[in-house]
Image (tube, grey):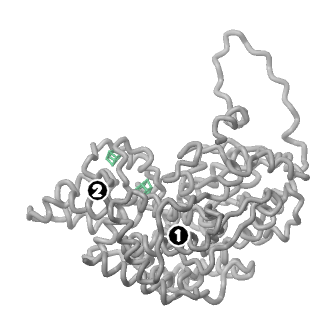
Amino acid sequence: MPHLSPKTEENTKLIEYVASRTGRDSRLETCIQCGTCGGSCPSAMDMEHTPRDVFALLRAGERETVLSSNTPWICVSCYFCAVRCPQEIKIPDVMYTLKSMAITKGAYQDSAASDFSQTFVDMVENYGRSYELGLATRHYLRHFPLRLPSMAPMGMGLLSKKRLNLKPKKIQGIKQLNDILDRAKELEAA
Amino acid sequence: MSKYLYYPGCSMEGSGKAYHDSLMPVCEKIGLELQEIDDWNCCGATEYLGINKLPAYALIGRNLALAEAQANGAKDIVAPCSACYLNLTKTDSYMAKKDGVDELINDALAAGGLSYEPGQLSIFHLLDVIVHEVGLDTVKKNVVRPLTGLRVAPYVGCMAPRYDYAKRWSDSEHPLELDLLIEALGAEVVDYPLKTHCCGGHMPQISPDTAYELIHRLVDYAEEVKTDIMVAICPMCQMNIDAYQNETNQHLGTNHKMPIVFFTQLMGLAFGIDEKTLGFGTELISAKDALAEIGSEKTVVKKKRPRKDKNALPMPQPLISKAPTREKEISR
Ligand code: SF4
Ligand code: SF4
């Protein structure tokens, strides 16, 4: 059990903060701790905390535990919990918020997950499209080098079936896209 | 011909090529004219939102803005990828709430000389368009080679019917659209309660063991109900189950060999389009043996129903026998 977060005002208002960052209708504060989300979640077995646990921890102001939990990173955004939650809480959206908070704070230790997202975002900002071959090789080289040999037959299979492009495609409006993204980042930081 | 703006998404140029190659001739046959959105960009998949929320919406917003500008008449976008479809509908519906997010996104878009008025476009998944807009009658009219004898598992995956921002699907956990379509092609739908369970999404990259477990569950159940072939409506689902199945076998000591193709490939087959055009053969788990089942009459032999014992308990009917009667209910 990691140590408890101090009862600062920032921490006691944690759930309100996460809710407001998620969007006005996240309904996060209305969680009744019924556990339907965790019971529906296909990847709960690999999560350090079920979604219900996460929301209890948020309410308790346990910032460090939540931000270093693997839960948001193991969430596959399948929306099972969201359609079943009796309180209609936008659970996957909350998970996205927690991911970006964890990245900003540098809190999450296992970097395979956050790095994958970041590598993906880098590709999109450079080309405007995602580029599966570059993404996969760069990511696997860094995080699962030992798995690469066993992945090779699959990669070769996809290549020989022309299902992987050797070169990334770049959109024409890449500058326009980056102008838009830069402005959005400014606005988000404001 | 009804016109739609077409948002292919990145996978269609790579791993999902067979989807693209098959949907084009199929759409032509059923009277759908697809006009690609010029210079579209990636939708961010499930990655961008976790890094930065507003830029993620702005990324998607650029596509909506380009589509709106190009619209002239056609106001409907069709996306074949469930993740793209979800991202586009989600952004549109969040902007339509007019609670300030729309202004922020438009502020960002203005930096690139663009803007988008939410609600200007309707966004559909390709399967939804075919079942609810084109209609199954038109599909049936085009069938020249019914897929008789082929046992198909309708694998819908999660992101099309959930969260269903545009309120289009018959159910978020057990939608019937894909079942009805497969039936219209003359194939047999197996009862597949895992139809909207997760394919693993980006887990092969992040936590491969989680992914292997999810893929194993889906394929294992399909085998148990004697599926010849699974069909997907999303390139990510098809990719995970097809390309990572051998990996899954290696790690779990299983011996799965379940082919999975796109629903448009099966449509094309039933429409008499040749296999190569439809991208058959690009799957890593070959569909060849499964396709050999077509025309085999093994499953159409009607079993005589045993006389009902007056005192017997009522048995639940398999989904497939109910499907045709529900057809009316869900058509709009
Ligand atoms: S299903 Fe909804 S209300 Fe129930 S514990 Fe999960 S988030 Fe809370
Ligand atoms: S969206 Fe995430 S948390 Fe919810 S059920 Fe799916 S994987 Fe679990």
Badge 1 element:
helix
Q: Is residue B4 left or right of residue A140?
A: right
Residue B213 is marked as none
Q: x, y (%) of residue B140?
A: 83, 47
Which-is-in-front pick, marks 2 and 1? 1
The residue positioned 63% from the left and 17% from the top of the image is: B313
Residue A110 lies, with reference to residue A57, above or below; the image says below
Residue A162 lies, with reference to residue B319, above or below; the image says below
Q: x, y (%) of residue B90?
A: 47, 60
| Image mark 1: chain | B
Which quadrant would the N terminus of chain A be assigned to in this image? bottom left
The residue carrying pointer 1 sits among few (fewer than 14), some (14 to 19) or many (20 or more) residues within 10 Å by Cα, namely many
Which quadrant would the C terminus of chain A be assigned to in this image? bottom left
The residue positioned 30% from the left and 65% from the top of the image is: A69
The residue carrying pointer 2 sits among few (fewer than 14), some (14 to 19) or many (20 or more) residues within 10 Å by Cα, namely many
Q: x, y (%) of residue A47?
A: 37, 59
How far apart, in angstroms, are the residues tagged by discs 2 and 1? 34 Å
User: Disc 2, ligand 2: is the CB inside 8 Å?
Assistant: no
Q: Circle 1 sits on which residue? A: B64
User: Of the residues shown, which amino acid type is indicated by label 1?
Assistant: Leu
**In-front residue for pair B227/B237:** B237
Residue A54 is marked as 2
